[in-house]
Amino acid sequence: MKKDVERIIKNIRGALQADGGDIELIEVTDDGIVKVALRGACSHCPMSTLTLKNFVEKSIIKEVPGVKEVISV
C-alpha cells in the first residue's frame, strides 16, 4: 500500500509545488491511515485543510484500496 500512496503523492506533488507548497509522506499505518506533512506555502495556507481533504485524500482513496483517511501531522 505504501508504494501506491508514494506514487499518487508523486503525481499530485506538481500541483502543490505550482502554488509554492509541497507534501511529504510520513507514514502509512496498517489500518489505512496516511500521515503526511504539508510543506512550504501549504504549511500555513488557510486553504490547506481543503487541499488535504478535497484533493490529496480524494486522490489517494480513489486509487489505493485500503486507505481510509489522510491526515496532516
Image (cartoon, helix red, strand yellow):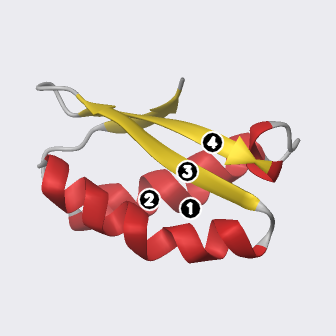
Amino acid tagged 1:
Phe
Question: In the image, which is nearer the foreground, mark 1 or mark 3?
Answer: 3
Of the image marks 3 and 2, the number of the one nearer the N terminus: 3
Q: Residue at x 70, y 40 (%)?
A: 49
Q: Which residue does the numbered mark 2 point to in the structure image?
A: 58
Q: Which residue does the numbered mark 3 point to in the structure image?
A: 23
Q: Which residue does the numbered mark 1 point to in the structure image?
A: 55
Amino acid tagged 2:
Lys
Residue 37 x, y percent position in the rendering: 55, 36
Residue 56 x, y percent position in the rendering: 50, 56
Do the residues under discs 2 and 1 have CB atoms within 8 angstroms?
A: yes
Q: Quadrant of the C terminus?
A: top right
Of the image marks 1 and 4, the number of the one nearer the N terminus: 4
Of the image marks 4 and 2, the number of the one nearer the N terminus: 4
9 vs 53: above or below:
below
Q: Residue at x 63, y 55 (%)?
A: 22
Q: CA distance from mark 4 to mark 2?
A: 16 Å
Q: CA distance from mark 4 to mark 3?
A: 5 Å
